[in-house]
Image (spheres, rainbow, N blue to C red):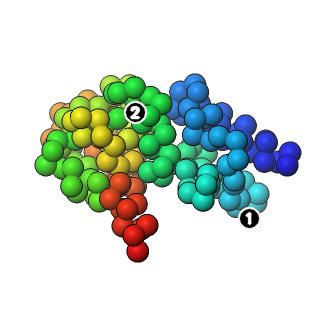
Amino acid sequence: MQDADKNLRKVRSIADYQFGKGCGEALFPEGVTFLLSRTNRVRQIIHNGQRIATVRAKDGMLTLSIAGAQVIHNVLPSPSYRVMVCDDAVPFVSKGKTVFAKHVIGLDKELRAGEEVLVVDASDKLLATGQLLLSPDEALSIGRGPAVDVRNGIDQEKDIHNN
């Protein structure tokens, strides 16, 4: 029991550091469970049978599932941690396809390349989660190449649960 409390404190502090104060408690309520690596490090955080996030082995940061992204989307006001795409890209991004720079119409100017982001449409509807590959200035000005490496799209999750 003591290890679970320690793990919960650890992942909450990672989330607070990564996304801002208060996000850890919102993402990881009491009752979450942990999948551990062979070396007893937290790898995945599960709530109600659903993966919320994974702790990346290379840097200890969190990658979000769609369920985790929805929590962050509800907690943080727009444009925090968001990359907004044009309507043409919506069907592809929601299926988990890469966001290209030419489709980016706005984003949080405080982001840095490599950060976990929420991909949204013009009305702030969550489409996907992934890793930003460019700086905000590059994403808006380059006009070509990948901008976000999408990890999970909302339609991917639906397809998984419908099969």
Asked which quadrant contains residue 112, the reply is: top left
25 horizontally vs 124: left or right: right
The numbered dot on residue 81 is: 2
**In this view of the protein, which residue sits in the foreground, 121 or 104?**
121
Asked which quadrant contains residue 18, the reply is: top right
Query: Of marks 2 and 1, which one's residue comes earlier in the chain?
Result: 1
Which x, y percent locates residue 81? 40, 33
Whole-Å distance between the Cαs marked 2 and 1?
Answer: 32 Å
For disc 1, the marked residue is 38
Which x, y percent locates residue 132? 36, 42
Query: Foreground mark, 2 or 1?
Result: 2
Residue located at (56% from left, 32% from top) = 23
The numbered dot on residue 122 is: none
Badge 1 crowding class, 10 Å Cα cut-off, few under 14, some 14 to 19, many 20 or more, is: few
Count of labels in the image: 2
Which x, y percent locates residue 19? 51, 32
Question: Quick check: 96 above or below 61?
Answer: below
Residue 115 can be seen in this image: no
